[in-house]
Image (cartoon, rainbow, N blue to C red):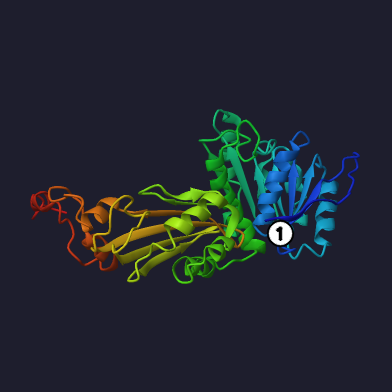
Amino acid sequence: MASNAGKNMNIQGEDGSTARLLFTPACGSGPGLVLLMPADTAERTISARATLFAEEGYTVFALRGISTVDDIDNAAYALGALPEATGGPVCVAHGHVGVSAIQAADAFQAIVAFDVDGLAGNPNLVLACPCPIVLQFGTRGNNDAGNTAETLRANINGKNGSRIYAWPDAAPGFALPGDGAFDSRVDSLAHSRTLELIRRVVGPYYDYVALFTEHIRHEFETRDVDATMATMIDDPYVNHVATLAGGVGHDMLKRFYKYHFVEQNSKDRSSVTVSHTLGPDRVVLELVVRFKHDQVLDRYFPGIPPTGQEVELATVLIVKFRGDKVCHEHIYWDQGSALKQISVLDADHLPIAGAEAARKVLDEHRPSNIFMEDAWATSEGKPI
């Protein structure tokens, strides 16, 4: 949760405009980030974006209507002089002010700019940028934005991590909450691309595997619901995709954990990690989970009394973080395989694997193509 939101910096630009607000992370300090918005941006939009980056661990200086290079330089210098800013600064800019941000690039260690107007006619500005830069364009219904993105690709320095992203599913303004074009799904994807750059350059650096290990320790070992919730943001959600079990928001999720999760875990439950993949704001865990259906398990088998059967499931968890807190979890498994293993699904004539599916994830040399023996035989001896 961001703190000090609303603290005024009182830095005035040459045109008489005043910089907006300082937002700091809950820990009180973090790498500095200058957030630049056009003059007509709504206050709630600025606050939403600044709060998001503060929750990600940055000390954010949010400005609206500051667009000259000198004003941006002054803002970067002022932010860097604050004790709350422990590194950087980096810059995130929206709309036409992105051009001025790039012109002021000497003041920043990295720049991310959204829907920037005015670059197509000056591609050398991007090529000459002294710091890594990520440009993101919503291109739906806007040929100019798409053409600009394609024109600039040849002028981007990919060797330092600079990138251009065009989002054909979203229109310009997709990353501004409250804008008519705002698209939360694409915005989430674009936000990860932003963090890919700025986390690499200035941090903060989080050990997501360790953070999630602490989260699941409270779920499965201490079975402490309050401690579990303390590892998450204020408004988290969890979705067990196969059965839609979980909760959205603090109260619903805490209710789920308290009454339908932490006390519903088999004593014989175990898991083996097959892989984990790290991103700038998430970890993807591939597991094989083993347990006995020896008690009610609402998240796996809602409405089905305990059968006493052993279950082995290949499971994928996609865990998104915001800063050092779990933001949400998507948990996937094969429900057909699960139901087959507790003998409530007649799958004798269906291509549904039981425990052998999980076991093959652990050992790729186990039999393949077991449900297509006849079809497989037809290709025997054919040239490959």
Image x and y of residue 179, in percent = 65, 33
Image x and y of residue 360, in percent = 24, 64
Q: Quadrant of the C terminus?
A: bottom left
Image x and y of residue 351, in percent = 18, 50
Asked whether the viewer can see residue 99, the reply is: no
Q: Residues within 10 Å of mark 1 (few under 14, many from 20)?
A: many
* Residue 8 relative to residue 28: left or right: right
Relative to 16, say whether 329 is above or below. below
Asked whether the viewer can see residue 86, the reply is: yes
Could you tell me which secondary element the residue under label 1 belongs to?
Answer: loop
Quarter holding residue 114: top right
Could you say which is closer to the camera, residue 116 or residue 280?
280
* Residue 212 relative to residue 342: left or right: right
Could you say which is closer to the camera, residue 304 or residue 232?
304
Count of numbered labels shown in the rendering: 1
The residue lying at 60 percent from left, 31 percent from top is: 144
Q: Quadrant of the N terminus?
A: bottom right
* Residue 2 relative to residue 11: left or right: left
Residue type pointed to by label 1: Pro
* Residue 95 relative to residue 82: left or right: left
Could you say which is closer to the camera, residue 188 or residue 353?
353
Image x and y of residue 198, in percent = 64, 57
Quarter holding residue 265: bottom left
The residue lying at 66 percent from left, 45 percent from top is: 113
Relative to 336, say whether 225 is above or below. below
The residue lying at 35 percent from left, 49 percent from top is: 242
The residue lying at 48 percent from left, 58 percent from top is: 258
What residue is shown with label 1? 25
